[in-house]
Image (cartoon, rainbow, N blue to C red):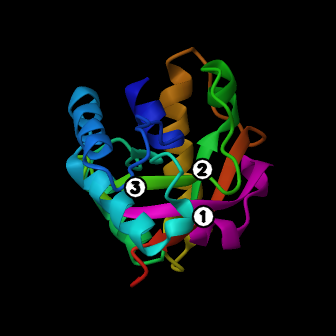
């Protein structure tokens, strides 16, 4: 289940939003220590709100990495940082099974590498629920971060991945299974 949470929905720990006061800054550091967050997460958020003061009262977003292993998590974080990966996919039935709210448009998230070091801040721009067999090549390219056979690669990678999670409950993937398709944009750093 740990990997499900990490991969499909970016569940992370929420911290109090940082203000300019030293007391509140210390609070974030204490929360990070308790929740095991790398300090780069709050540092990235603080840099973002310094450049975008209209968000200074927002809570620090959830943080997590894509996928369930170091190589893929780090590769996908780099693709996101470069602006090539612009979508992520989750299995609708797993959201329901674990009673997790579907992602929402406008939600910001801090994507980390496998070790929890902040890499990039994203903002969800669109959420759709689409059957597996109706995923488009355009969407697959956004999710995979490549234009070389994106739909073929997307189907293979996601079928295998979802099959693993479904097998835990004695289920199997099928062509009509619903996929939560999250489109996002990279909002920080701006130099991608």
Of labels 1 and 2, the one closer to you:
1
Which mark sits nearer the N-terminus, 1 or 3? 3
Residue 117: image tag: none
Q: Residue at x 78, y 50 (%)?
A: 130
Residue 135 inside the magenta-drawn segment: yes
Q: Tag 2, which secondary structure?
A: strand
> Which is more N-terminal, label 2 or label 3?
2
Position above or below: 105 against 69: below
Alpha-carbon span between mark 3 and mark 2: 15 Å
Query: What residue would you read off at disc 3?
Result: 111
Residue picked out by circle 1 = 184
Direction from residue 176 to residue 160 in the image, left or right: left
Instruction: Please give left or right for residue 171 compared with residue 56 in the image.
Output: right
Q: Which residue is mark 2?
A: 89
Image quarter of the C terminus: bottom left
Q: Position of residue 15 (x, y in %)?
A: 40, 38
């Amino acid at each position: 289940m740990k990997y499900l949470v990490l991969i499909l929905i970016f569940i992370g720990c929420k911290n109090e939003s940082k203000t300019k006061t030293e007391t509140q800054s210390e609070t974030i550091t204490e929360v990070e220590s308790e929740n095991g967050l790398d300090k780069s997460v709050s540092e990235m958020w603080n840099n973002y709100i310094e450049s975008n003061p209209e968000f200074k009262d927002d809570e620090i977003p959830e943080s997590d990495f894509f996928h369930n292993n170091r190589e893929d998590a780090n590769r996908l974080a780099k693709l996101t940082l470069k602006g090539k990966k612009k979508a992520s996919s989750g299995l609708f039935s797993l959201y329901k099974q674990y009673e997790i709210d579907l992602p929402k448009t406008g939600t910001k998230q801090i994507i980390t590498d496998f070790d929890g070091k902040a890499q990039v801040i994203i903002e969800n721009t669109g959420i759709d629920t689409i059957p597996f067999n109706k995923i488009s090549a355009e969407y697959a390219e956004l999710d995979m971060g490549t234009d070389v056979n994106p739909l073929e690669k997307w189907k293979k990678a996601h079928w295998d991945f979802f099959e693993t999670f479904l097998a835990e409950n004695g289920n199997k993937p099928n062509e009509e299974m619903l996929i939560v398709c999250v489109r996002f944009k990279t909002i920080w750093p701006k130099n991608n």
